[in-house]
Amino acid sequence: MRKLFLAIAVCCSLLPSMAQKEVSLKLDPAQSQWFREAKFGMFIHWGLYSCFAGSYNGHTLPDTSLPNGNSWYAEWGEKRLEIPDEVYRGKVHDFSTPNYNPDEWARLAKEAGMKYLVITAKHHDGFALWNSKVSHFDVELTPGKKDLLAPLVKACKKYGLKYGFYYSHWEDWEHKGGAKPSWEKQPTDEEYQKYWEEKSLPQVKELLVNYDPDLLWFDTWGEEGTLLTPQRRDELIRLVRTYSKKCLINGRICYTNPGEDIDFLEMMDNEYPASLQDRPWQTPATMQHSWGYHAKDFNWKPTKQMLTYLVSNTSKGGNYLLNIGPKADGTIPVPAVRRLREMGAWLSANGEAVYGASPISVQVPDGVYLSQKTEGGKHLLYVFITKSMEQLTIPITARGSISVLETGQPISYTQNGNAVSLSLPENLFRDSSIQVLKLEIQ
């Protein structure tokens, strides 16, 4: 009887691993429909690096006097500013967040017209914004000792936002076995495997089990080397599929070889494809140069420029994930708030042409972008015009009237064979924002 009990116990102990092997690496495509329709999301880079705000010991990024200081990325401050580990990690005791208001963050994303939100749960420095059971380097060391993710998840649900987490699965500067910046010595495969098993996989599981995210944003950029093998990539995908039937996975899980089981392609930072892609995709983008809060990065992009990126991506079937870098105390910089509100105002009038729209392969002049959708049995075309012009010819056949989406102002046109020629009134461009026309086509 004892032998039988032991045999049953052994079999039961194998069930999780056996079940995991049977899990499909592919997610039901229907689970990503929301992503294809959403078009616009908020990225948030926030962590210990926010405390340094891009400067340390008389140096401010970018700083070519430092061997690797020629970057604006404040979230890389520990390495690029050569901050000693004990100084950087000791900052955890000062990471007080008195102005962190997750409801305000989620509400701002909602008002900006964003449909989902992604926050850096753990960046390359290895610091976790939640109470991790497999690492001591987390919010338990902060003055507040509070999970910073849970209230943000609650706020996202309140405002109807999908939510996800950035997780640095490949690089980790706190764990001896995590991958390091390219100019430093890399761990051995054995050391990396120890990190993979002790921290990376278990923390991803924690995020899945504790917060049930809609997507996970993994980060590589073509320097994965020999550490992030296809086998490890697939092991991570299998872990996600085991614990979630809805969580999307991005292509930067392994940029050089994402495989066929990811759910959407992730472009490189601020990269905007010139043509349609063969999978759902998105561009992660900054409002400034830096992702994390940089007190001396004043390179704010104009609202119209960012809206142009949004409509350009929409016209090519992609999404736009726009970043904010809150200050260490939780305050969102005023320039970011202003731009988000301006984008939200534009989308309140023109969002019909963005959300749920699909691309159309029609040649148009520079500065013009198109999207399409079918509603009420009508095939609708939307024309985004980003610069002043008097005439516009599009190789399509129009039906019925053509008007400005926001105001309803009628637009005169003539149909010349398979092309429609639009006469654009001068008053259309007194407003410096992007103008959108709406028409029915065959």
Image (cartoon, grey):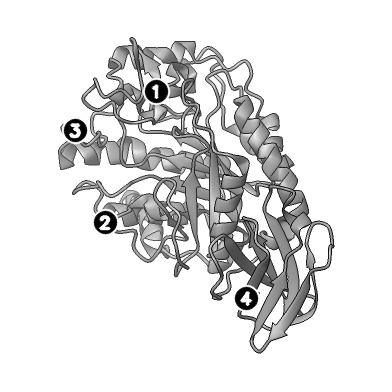
- Secondary structure found at label 3: loop
Mark 4 is on which residue type?
Ile
- C-beta proximity under 8 Å, tags 4 and 1: no
- Taking 104 as reference, is 75 left or right? left
Q: Residues within 10 Å of mark 4 (few under 14, many from 20)?
A: some
- Graded by Cα atoms within 10 Å as few (under 14), some (14 to 19) or many (20 or more), the crowding at tag 3 reads few
Q: Nearer the viewer, mark 4 or mark 2?
A: 4
Tell me where residue 302 sits by quadrant. Answer: top right
For marks 2 and 3, the one nearer the N-term is: 3
Picture coordinates of residue 198 (x, y %)? Answer: 31, 36
Disc 2: which residue: 231
For the C terminus, the image quarter is bottom right
The residue carrying mark 1 is: 137
Dots 3, 1 in contact, CB < 8 A: no
Amino acid type of the residue that numbered disc 2 sits on in the rendered structure:
Gln
Observer-nearest of 12 and 211: 211
